[in-house]
Image: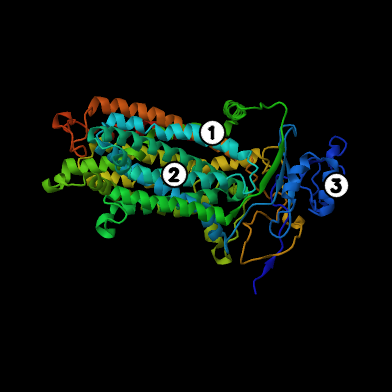
Amino acid sequence: MAAAFPTRASTSNSTLIPTSSNGQPDTDSNPDFADDWHPSPATSNPGGYVGPTRRPSSLNLEFDRDRDRDRNRDIDRHAGEVIDGAPTINRSIREEGFAEMSTWVGQPHIKGSSEAMRMVLLTFNAIGITFTWGVEMTYCTPYLLNLGLTKSNTSLVWIAGPLSGLIVQPIVGVIADQSTSKWGRRRPFIVMGSMIAALSMIVLGFTQEIVGFFVADEKSARGFTITLAVLAIYAVDFAINAVMSCARSLIVDTLPIEKQQAGAAWSSRMSAMGHMMGYGAGAIDLVGMLGTTLGDTQFKQLTLIATFFILFSSGVSCWAVTERVLISTRPDSRKPVGRFKVFSQIWSTLLNLPPRIQAICWAQFWAWIGWFPFLFYSATWVGETYFRYDAPEEAKNSKDMLGDVGRIGSTALVIYSTVTLIGAWLLPMITKSPDDEKYTARPPQGLATLAEKFSKRKPDLMTVWMAGHLMFASAMFMAPFAASFRFATFLVVICGLPWTIAMWAPVTFLGVEVNKLSGATEAGGPAYRRLSNADDIELPAINADHALHLEHGSDTPGASSSTGELSGIYFGILNIYSTLPQFIGTFISTIVFTILEPGKSPELAKGADPAEHHDTDGPNAIAVCLFIGAISALGAAYATSRLRYL
């Protein structure tokens, strides 16, 4: 018989009331709380903020309806819903003068029988995101070159990535923050974005067949094929960015502050697995293995497999996670309203970033100038290096040059993603979390001494982040000197560890800062805190086989938890600092390609006139772009070091 566990009315710190100097509710200045809120006797906190112990009974709901008819129209809509056996209503007050109140129902929880399983389910959608993104990055550049685009024009197509990140992630983040969907704030956007990405991947893989069905003339069809392929790439990028934005915010919304590094690390692990699976599939001769049932080329079959992965992985995470539901928000009259509210809110927040978040964003800005050419061109660079320096003559006359270049590049990226995955598992274990000073480890008694010595020597996350920038810069400075595909592969592979850190460190730091802004920690002066575990309210029990809560509590009064109310907009702003440098990277790449390789690719554009091919005697243009990115990575290391003094 399965054990049953009592649940708590809310483990979130978002249900807050002001208190007077004796620890009692300050009902004189806040009469709205006088009747239906009372402090926990076990957690009085003179002069501070404590969580109330409000029982979600029908009497309270009835009292609310009499007191505030307008607001409780929304509560009525959700009062019949059952979360873990009973309805749960709580309120959230923002720190800015208590000007904005939010009403919530339920509490976040994740299915799973262990913490590791819950972390896997929470971050499982990262596998589909990175699998799809990996297929796009590995094959779309050679695909566009194969259609006849020059490298300079191809680099302009990749504006889709930063443009979608600049537009989609901040806007979707703000809209999702305010969503009152009964399914939660993040999951509906994850589902819709995944469906759009899946449909766009199918269109991308079969553009020639789709255009050929409507256009008979071969010359006209080629132009329409390029146009449709570019539009499909834009659609994939826009949709993936929406999914990525909400997936990151879902982690922040669901996990307590002391679990933010663990959540970011698990997301990095799932991402590495997705990359490894995507690159592994790209390195295999799928047509030879599966036949032509799923398509007659490697690229077509990969797009169909990516379609399955993005839908399946997003479905698993959305099934496993239950979000608390925002019912209504009583707006701040000082804040803008109307159709431009979203843009005004983003702009206002962008101009008034807290110093530490600003420093995180600038480190991300300089880092992404370096990462942009690596992520989009490294597979093509390895493939070109092979065909220029190492390939036998018969390999240069292949009928599926796109597939061959993609497979060579994917082989390098499989090893790279394996290193990334190993780093994602090991680095968090040997790196001190930003919140480690509030966490006391309890290892087995026999290992306590060894663990204590090791803990003192663990590098902090900021040091690891700086080391990642420097390691990436060192590798990319060598790119122009690669005269064999083995050396090029080696340079790509050693960037696996820096990429692990780049995906994990800024998200961890920002998650901690966002939760501090949401009042989740007592550090740095007056803040909000949650009730300790001693003040849990018992509700009807649930079956442990069906759903177990990710533990938010602690035995200490200062235990922190996550509300994530601000996560959407701040992660959207972090993404702005990730996408703006990609515009700079695109501009740099276009100039480099125009100067060094202005013609069409001799390796991929076999159907073009040989006079249109660019020269291959000079330095590889992609390698030069990677070298320039290394310089920017040094700037990222300096920007990261400044975070230590804020």
Instruction: Give the percent coordinates (x, y) of residue 271.
Output: 44, 49
Disc 2 crowd rating (10 Å Cα; few below 14, some 14-19, many 20+) is many
Mark seen at residue 626: none
Q: Nearest the camera: 52 or 450?
A: 52
Q: Position of residue 289 (x, y in %)?
A: 27, 59
Q: Element under label 1?
A: helix
Displayed quadrant of residue 632: top left
Give the class, few, some or many, for how many residues have Cα within 10 Å of label 3's Cα (few <14, many ≥20): few
Location of mark 2 (residue) = 197
Horizontal arrangement in the rendering, residue 95 relative to residue 149 (left or right) = right
Q: Position of residue 243 (x, y in %)?
A: 50, 44
**Residue nearer the viewer, 286 or 387:** 286
Q: Of the numbered discs in the image, which one, if any, rests on residue 63?
A: 3
Quadrant location of the C terminus?
top right
- Colour setup of the view: rainbow
Task: Find the distance from the CA under tag 2 to the CA under tag 3.
Answer: 46 Å
- Earlier in the chain: of badge 2 and badge 3, it is 3
Query: Looking at the picture, how far across and down is residue 218, in whole percent?
Result: 23, 36
Helix, strand or loop under label 3? helix
Location of the N terminus (image quadrant): bottom right
Q: Amino acid at mark 2?
A: Ala
Residue indicated by mark 1: 573
Q: Comparing marks 1 and 2, which lies closer to the viewer?
A: 2
Compared to 317, does 71 lie above or below?
above
Q: Quadrant of residue 201?
A: top left
Count of numbered circles in the view: 3
